[in-house]
Image (spheres, grey):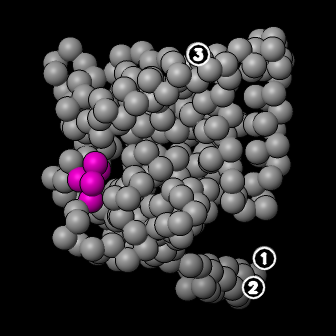
Amino acid sequence: MGLKRTLTLLAAAVGTALSSAVLAPVAQADPAWCPSLNVVAVPGTWETSSTPDPARGNGMLAAVTSGLPAGTRVDYVQYPATAFPWEGDVYAASRQRAVDNARGLIAATAAQCASTRFALVGYSQGADAAGDLAAEIGTGLGVVPPQRLAAVGLLSDPRRSETDILVGPPVAGSGAAGARIGGFGFVSADVRTICAVGDLYCSTPKDDFITRMAGFIAAGAGSAPDRFDDYRVEAEGLYNEIMRAGGIPTLQLQLTPQANDAREVEIRKFYESQVHQDYGMYVVDDRGTTATTWLRNWLASKA
């Protein structure tokens, strides 16, 4: 090969390499304001609204999200946080607003901050919503890939499953609304749930079918049409459990005057105990760590 041809080929190769280097996309650094960890917090029923009053504070989760390490940003989800029709949105519609709004917060940050990881925390109705969004992300088809969800902390989750990783003393049964079909998928190992002993919202006994049916109806009434298949599967599961336990005669025994009186006494004791409102004092380990402090420390370890 002649010198002229060799030099021509080398020049062409160098030109191609330079052209590729110029045209290749350059990885953009995240804006300076991007957090390393974005904690998205969903308050419980009546702890917020669609237009919350800053003077009200952040409810149960205030102790969980305060004083987290530098580089962490906390966003609170605004949503109706109602439960009854006369308040505006029924429970299911309110919870779905929380899911949608939390998803929107994550999407907005994720679009600009490629390195930011996320954490979801919720209390009561907020735990219901945060858990549903975590389960959605856990399918691998959510608003961010599962690996970007670093932690999910749920206080008094009405959809707690017996298979969820529980922090604190063991409790009976599962959440009053029934466990999520499919669980948390790829993010299961990064979910922690805390349920106080005696909190009926997150620990309804498995054989109390009347309470479980009431919880299922309350959680599902007013749900979006795209949730129909999920609730159909859950209803079939509950029906099969009832049949295995004796069917209609079992339900009849749970609806006798004596059984109704006993249930009324239990529910009254539950509300009077304030156990559902006491997670700031509920101890979850032998060092005396409370539920809210444990959850805050766990989030801090993820920052």
Q: Which is nearer the eye, 184 or 227?
A: 227
Identify the disc placed on residue 1: 1
Nearer to the camera, 108 or 284: 284
* Mark drawn on residue 258: 3
**Which circle marks residue 5 in the picture?**
2
Provide the residue span drawn in magenta: 58-62
Nearest-to-viewer mark from 3 and 1? 3
Q: Does residue 299 show up magenta in the picture?
A: no
Depth check, front residue: 61 or 27: 61
Residue type at mark 1? Answer: Met
Task: Assess whether mark 2 and mark 1 are in contact (beta carbons under 8 angstroms).
Answer: yes
Q: Nearer the viewer, mark 3 or mark 2?
A: 3
Residue 115 pos. (x, y %): 42, 62
Q: Is residue 297 above or below residue 137?
A: above
Residue at horizontal 72 percent and vertical 82 percent from the top:
9
Question: Mark 1 Cα within 10 Å, few/some/many (few <14, many 20+)?
Answer: few
x%, y% of residue 268?
Answer: 40, 30
Q: Is residue 61 magenta?
A: yes
